[in-house]
Amino acid sequence: MPGSTSTLRFWLLNTLGWALFCVVSLSLTRVFGGGSSSGSTLISVGLGVLLCGISGGLRGWAQRRHWWQLGFAALLLRLAVAVLLGAALAQVLLAGVLQPALALGWVDFGGHPGDFRPAARVAYWLNTALVLGLWTALWASLHSVRHARRAELERLRAEAERSALERDALRARLNPHFVFNALNNLRALILEDPERARQMVTDLSRTLRHALEHARSEDAVLADELAVVQDYLAVEAVHYEQRLQVHIDVDPAAAQARLPVMALQLLVENAIKHGIAVRPGGGEIRVSAHCSNGMLRLRVDNPIGVAAAGMDAATAGHGVGLAYLRSQLGSGGRFQLQPVEGRMQALLEIPQCARA
């Protein structure tokens, strides 16, 4: 439908444009050519009709051959050659009608003979090529602008869809593992500690509700993300018990800072997976956040597990979750994961975060 609408619009403008050319050509002939004649009228009208069809055919050929997928130089060369050939075709067809009409006496030039010398034919061809070239440059420029805008919109749409798919795939990968462990722990708690089991159900439901409510969100407020992480940690504490210790230090001024959805939870999950789960004695996860100079600085660190003891900054942090996190930061954000004094430290910096 968009293609047919664009074609119809082109043909309407193309017809109006060459009709205007006929009117202007007849007027100029009448004013500067010593009055109109049947021969000059045939030339003006015939050339306008021919160039209308040729310019339309040129556009259709260019679209079928996908010229706008080429580079600028290749497109310009093809259009220039097409204009020269189209002008030559128009002159040949016009001469094929005009000369027999003159010979049969159907038209005349007011008593003046027609000039069909080679030099004159070359001049006619160049004039026709100039007019056709100007018209072609006009519609080709407009088409190029529309094509560039459409290509940019398609690129942005594809990036948005890819980002949504990555986010959904990430949630699908993370949530089942977490829920599976939580349900197993809940089953064990129901008979042993019913009160703690009820609290765990509350924490788990809030965590899952957050994932559903923010399924299409790009970013979130740090205070909200911190609340859901605390629910998540409460559920994980049932699984790891005393092996999981948590220390949270968040500046109140940073509570309304914005960050990618699940960013904090990803960092905490990563810290548990690589720092707590792989150590027999567990350890402490530290979460801190503050804003300064329009930048949110969020840090999550954990004890280095046995498997990660020999890992350096160049090899750390290449999982799916962290790759997703990096893709959401844009050009102004920064993510760094490196060992610092026997602990693995994840540092996330996000600009334009502060809100009063």
Image (cartoon, rainbow, N blue to C red):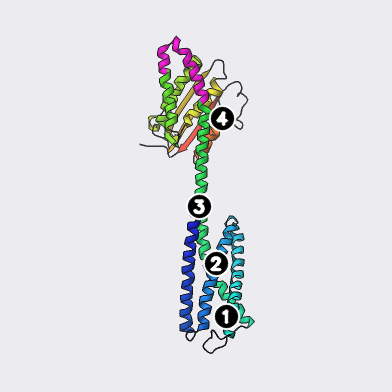
Residue 64: percent from the left, percent from the top? 59, 58
Tell me the residue that label 4 is attached to.
338
Tell me the residue that label 1 is attached to.
98
- Report the Cα–Cα distance between label 3 and label 4: 42 Å
Mark 3: which amino acid? Answer: Arg
What span is in magenta?
176-199
Residue 127: percent from the left, percent from the top? 56, 75
Ranked by sequence position, the earlier of labels 4 and 2 is 2
Q: Between label 4 and label 2, give the one nearer the viewer.
A: 2
Residue at the image position 52 percent from the left and 51 percent from the top = 151
Q: Would you place residue 53 above or below residue 250 in this image?
A: below
Q: Would you place residue 278 above or below residue 313 in this image?
A: above
Residue 187: percent from the left, percent from the top? 47, 14
Q: Between label 3 and label 4, give the one nearer the viewer.
A: 3
Q: Is residue 218 left or right of residue 65?
A: left
- Report the Cα–Cα distance between label 1 and label 4: 83 Å
- Report the Cα–Cα distance between label 1 and label 3: 44 Å
- Report the Cα–Cα distance between label 2 and label 1: 21 Å
View extreme (top): residue: 192
Is the C terminus in the top left, top right, bottom left or bottom right quadrant? top left
* SS at mark 4 in the image: strand
View extreme (right): residue: 118
Residue at the image position 42 percent from the left and 32 percent from the top = 213
State yes or no: discs 4 and 2 in contact (Cβ < 8 Å). Answer: no
Ranked by sequence position, the earlier of labels 2 and 1 is 2
